[in-house]
Image (tube, rainbow, N blue to C red):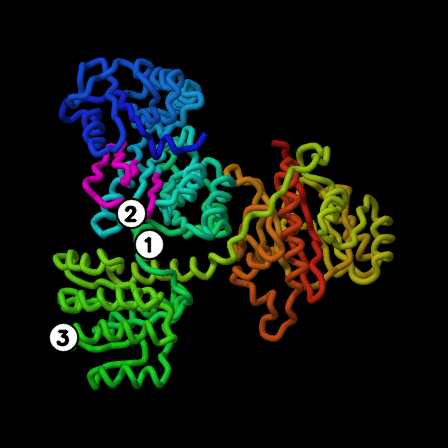
Amino acid sequence: MTLDRVFNPARVAVVGASDRPGKVGSVIWRNLAAFEGERIPVTTSADRVGGVPAVPSLTEIEGEVDLAILVVPARAAPAIARQAAAKGVGGMVVLAGGFAETGPAGAVLQAELVEAAGPVRIVGPNCFGIQNIALGLNASITMAGDVEAGTVALVTQSGAYGMAIHSLALDENLHFGKVYSSGNKADIGDHEVIRYLHQDPGTRIVCLLAESVTDGAELAAAIRAASPTMPVIVTKTGRSEAGARAALSHTGALGTDDAVFRAAMRQAGAITVRSGLEMLDVARVLTAQPLPRGARAAIITNSGGVGVELADMLEDEGVEVPELSPGLRDHIAERLPPIGGARNPVDMTPIWSRFAELYPWLTDTLARSGEIDLVIPVLLQRAAMDEATLTGLRDTVAALRAGGNQVPVYCCWVTPREARGRADVLQSAGIPCLEWPERVARAVGHAVRYAANRPGITPPVQIDPSEPFGLADGPVQATEASAILAGYGIATVESALCTTGDEAVTAAGRLAGPVVMKTAAPSVAHRTEAGGVRIGLGTPDEVREAYRALSALGPDVLVQRQLDGVEVVVGALRDPVFGPVVMAGLGGTMVELLEDVVFALAPVTNSEAIEMLESLAGFPLLAGYRGGPAVDLYALGEVISGVARLAAEHPEVGEIDLNPVMCTESDAVAVDWKLYVSHP
């Protein structure tokens, strides 16, 4: 069922509507005063609410009801939900808390609510409601006021924090068009809301504030479908242990591993930010100005110190502040005071009398130069308080757009608190003013990266589950695991499983050259730490002695040809929220110490696997560090994509560990591998 009856209802019933001041039912009824459709009070406490005749129950309303807002205690919600189901209501907003966030008894009540509602879509419970500003729909406990509908949608799991973000956005001239408070997400998932908003012609950007994720794979897929045309800005709280505890008590849902979450969002093309404030800054930058076509920034300032700080912070975000060409420098220097600087940042010095001339002229000149992809005027103190400077900048940007110039302009606003209101001259014209260099740099960095990454966001590879291997739960025997890996194009080093010293000597002779011997005991997770590996064995006596020592850990011993190369770890796990996840990093015995690993949702293509490798801090070791040979990235990418496909096609494979994979100029071969089966 579509969410259209939730976001675009024609008739809304308020169950628990009231005229009594201070009652939530009164707040909701009053907030719906501007609603373009029909509102119906449902209550047994009064004959009329706000002059509108009341009915005692949902089932006694004549005609269809699209949306019901439940202003009732938690324990009464299931009974109202049954009425809604009987009436054929499209959706209902359950404001009350007291459900899964309170513990086991609340979880039982929440399950009863969902069962009672049947096909009726549930917003919440434990939420503050929804808004569709263009429709005058404020089915929430927060005041929307008489505001213009914007093109940004806010989807927030937090109630009070979401309302605070809503208020701050209005203060800084960012207008939401739709607001959705998900609360405990008993029914409607974030992925459904994002898919709906992606199809909504009035929404250009989505801000998602999440505390928990209930269906990670579906969420990632929804964002991945939307990101090429609609930015999705995501911030997730509960990343720390303390934050996860707080999120559990607040929403009744466990958080997910932050590394997996961030990997999934990166792969989906989401813009992942650290806080609600950063989320709003990015939304303001993206909704107000064209996307930057590159990463070259020009800074215009009247303070050298602020210009230097902003340049440093932009470089930290991957945004270049290039030196201008000699011709452009000379052209600019002709207009600057003798002590000014024209290199970039362009420093006009505190020449107050010429601010109104220089800020607009420099912005226009740099935007038209062809050397710059974005312009950041720093409006510090007097510059921000000068009306002529602000209106000149506003008109300059308007003229650039009218002439087809798409170089974005973002202002760095550095003023006393009492001057903040002056920014409205620019912000009301679509020129964002972000306070202080750090906020500007972070938001601009996100905009530059999103613009660069957007063309490369592709649909995920589709995989159907295969027939199970028919293996028992637990570790898979080494030779059987090797055969499974071979079926997915993953080479393992030539090996022999031996149960006697003589077998080991024979195997070593057949393999020729130095060999490695290691215990094949399934109970040994870390062979090196357990003393379960011997390397560089060349003579029969060395092989027999190694077998004698290793057989103390178990009778099965692997004999392998010894390989050299760059050691890489490749693995897969089954995340409880996101499903199969593939991992790659610098491997060997140092993998846990270095923690230089990257994750992605499985499956992945070879090109996506190589992108994973390129994001590693240790990637230069793979690319040929200090003149060393580069490894075969395509072959290594095939190992990663093969492991990902194996994990995606076989839900019973709970964990895969290839550590290390020996990588050379021509090959990538696993020399140690483990598969664990755990049927769902």
Name the image quarter holding the C terminus: top right
Q: How many residues crowd mark 2 within 10 Å: few (<14), some (14–19), many (20+)?
A: some
Amino acid type of the residue that numbered disc 3 sits on in the rendered structure: Trp
Tell me the residue that label 3 is attached to: 352
Q: Residue at x 33, y 26 (%)?
A: 67
- Check residue 287 in the rendering and tell me which mark sits there, or answer none: 1
| Tag nearer the camera, 2 or 3 | 2
Task: Please say whether residue 588 is visible from this viewpoint.
Answer: no
Percent across and percent down for residue 302 are 21, 73
Q: Residue 289, position in %: x, y? A: 32, 59
Measured in 3D between alpha carbons, the distance from the residue under mark 2 to the one under mark 3, in whole angstroms, is 36 Å
Above or below, 230 relative to 397: above
The part of the image, by quadrant, that contains residue 49 is top left
Left/right placement of residue 423 relative to residue 477 reads: left
The kind of residue tagged 2 is Gly
Residue located 28% across and 73% down the image: 364
Q: Is residue 263 above or below residue 539?
A: above
As measured in the structure, the alpha-carbon distance from the residue carrying label 2 to the one carrying label 1 is 9 Å
Contact (CB < 8 A) between labels 2 and 1? yes
- The earlier-in-sequence mark between 2 and 3 is 2
Of residue 50 and residue 552, the one placed in the foreground of this image is 50
Front position in the image: 155 or 671: 155
Look at the image and give the residue range highlighted in magenta. 131-156
Asked if labels 3 and 2 touch by Cβ distance under 8 angstroms, the answer is no
Mark 2 or mark 1: whose residue is earlier in sequence: 2
User: What secondary structure is found at the residue carrying circle 1?
Assistant: helix
